[in-house]
Image: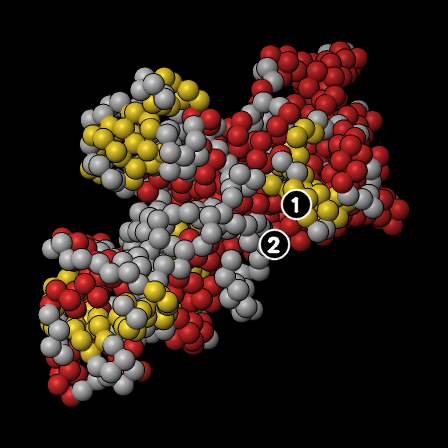
Amino acid sequence: MSHYRRLDRDRPPSPGPRPASPLQGQAGGKRGCCGASHGHPPHDHAGDACCTSQALVLDRLAAPEIGADGTRTAIRILQMDCPTEEALIRKKLEGMPSVTSLDFNLMQRVLTVVHAPEALAAILEAVRSLGFEPELASEGAPRAASPEAGQGWWPLAGAGTAAIASEAANWTGGPAWLAAALAVLAIAVCGLGTYRKGWIAIRNGNLNINALMSIAVTGALALGQWPEAAMVMLLFTLAERIEALSLDRARNAIAGLMQLAPDQATVQQDDGSWHEIEARTVAAGRIVRVRPGERIALDGNIVRGNSAVDQAPITGESLPVDKSEGDPVFAGTINLAGSFDYRVTAAADNTALARIIHAVEEAQGAKAPTQRFVDRFARIYTPTVFAIAVAIAVLPPLLLSGSWHGWIYKALVLLVIACPCALVISTPVTIVSGLAAAARHGILIKGGAYLEQGRLLNCLALDKTGTLTHGKPVLTDFESRAGLTPEHCRSLAASLADRSDHPVSQAIASAAKRDAIAREPVEAFEALPGRGVRGAIAGKTYFLGNHRLVHELERCSPELETRLYALERQGKTVVLLSDDTQVLALFAVADTVKDSSREAIADLHRLGIRTVMLTGDNPHTAGAIAAHVGIDEARGDQLPDDKLNAIAAFAREGTVGMVGDGINDAPALARAHIGFAMGAMGTGAAIETADVALMDDDLRKIPAFVRLSRATRAILVQNITLALGIKVGFLALTLAGLGSMWMAVFADVGASLLVVGNGLRLLRR
């Protein structure tokens, strides 16, 4: 990971060490002007990358990791749905000396514990003592729906019938014992689970919603409010069930990604035959056949055949992409027309789809700023409301000679709405919905903090090659100087360019290959970041680099400057070949601007975002491209440190983003408030350092990201206002004597359902 990461204090706080890049291993992009490949050693994802099948995902999730601070174990708890359970578990485990830290992911129902190696059994037993069923993911089945969601509805229907009958008996003046018996029956059928959870919470000194509801219903029974007590417990249980189903919908938005890649793949055997085997067992290098209409099981490159492929699940592209021999294909995408064979390039737990899923899951575990604020507020809110309820029950009768029955009833009503579940659950549901909606459209956001902060973006800096342009320039001009033959000059340049995968170098090398220009062995090869390369051929040192390098070598002349100026004014990038004394040849290449770039820049301007180009190319080329796409400001001759300093200056004026795809962009990506990486062509370093990856390299997704961020913020504000407003309003009604217990249940669970449903609206964006 780039050592520039998190040096500035105005970036969102990080929830912890950044995980290994979820997209590490993608095809390399820009490396520096004619620079050498700065590839990174392959990263082993076996321990932290998720798989296309749920089983492999869970195996990865549960695998204990031993670090300097202890063993890190992920525990799945299906009963852990909301902050009620989190607070109970946290209080229990934080008192254990063998536990170092706890990390809760309520949306995935996963608790990650850092603990002493020998303490796992005691931790699991402590969780069981709270009435939960913890399991290591590798021990059980794939993730299931909430336990409440899987229960039958008949017991609830029976309890409802009994509660309504109790109410009817009370209204019609029937025997008191009949109304009481029916109420007790209803509570016994639907409320024993709540009582059990409430008792566990009280025993552990925790006033969660189950404890408060148990106290309230018991108090109502003691006051002789039989029908109301039954109806309160019924409505609470029903609302819990509906809320669990609603939360499962948010979880399924991510779980659905796991189902995109098929479990089976048709693989060529050593004898040439074809057999279907489990995709998770297929190693890189094997040949897989895909028939029309099938989903692709693994990442690879086509070796035979051609077809059109729907890549929307990975890149969000709306139109199919034509694929032929040599083109990459991705797991989870759909083969539409033809049949083809491809060579696997990544195992099932390291496909682009697997890394996307892992990145989104990691993002879910990182709390956004609003969520952290709400969590802090909730820790104060619940005991405060409980203290108010106790005061209402005791002080008016003692000080004002009020009715004990009336004031205790009002206190019980307040207890029902004291739990902050609606407030606390509103933020993670909204954030996860936003992350899932973005992932579905090829925008990989690595945390809720960046999703929230995108709305504040007021300046966006962009690299040129591979970002605004296709990154595949072609050779347009060649001039031999200093008396050498054109073939010899092109041979020297191609020999050096072959050692770099920078697009400009590749244009020179490809043109030489097309014209059958011979290569020569290169020794003492060295990259000069932001300038070019140097190497020895036949014992003589040669340089291949940009205008800046020629200036530094003091090889420029007025006549050469005039020629360079003319080419650069045409928007071409000039690369010069020189030896120890003079310039031998010049090569001009031109890149083509992406069709989407101008539209994206115009869309950003409509959103009020200023745009700046930062490129290592000369100022004339930068200016020509910037004018073509409508960028506000262009800066050329930018070295990595120059880009970093420019971003630091912009950051002092407001929230700044940086878009890039190369190793040269990594420092600037890290320094920006939000770093955007090109996910398809971007280098591993750029994608690892960035906060948002655009999976199809389409800049139009950045305005979409900003709009999603603004919508997310609006829904977060709406949810917090709804949750607090309903509770404050009902508090006033209760103190005025207009509130009842069953109305309080509607206020509490109704608020929860409202905020969950409101947050899920983001999934439809």
The residue indicated by pointer 1 is 103
Badge 2 marks a residue whose secondary structure is loop
Q: Position of residue 557 (x, y in %)?
A: 18, 87
Image location (x, y in percent) of residue 626: 22, 69
Q: Residue furthest bottom?
A: 558
Using the rendered view, name the quadrant where residue 418 is placed: top right
Could you say which is closer to the camera, residue 431 or residue 499? 499
Q: Are marks 2 and 1 in contact (CB under 8 Å)?
A: yes
State how far apart marks 2 and 1 are (Cα). 10 Å
In the image, 131 versus 724, the foreground residue is: 131
Residue bearing mark 2: 16
711 relative to 669, above or below: above
Q: Position of residue 527 (x, y in %)?
A: 36, 67
Q: Closer to the N terminus: mark 2 or mark 1? A: 2
Q: Local crowd at mark 1 within 10 Å, few (<14), some, or many (≥20)?
A: some
Q: Secondary structure at mark 1?
A: strand
Q: Nearer the viewer, residue 376 or 333?
A: 333
Q: Is residue 543 at all visible to an observer of this figure?
A: no
Q: Residue at x 72, y 23 (%)?
A: 193
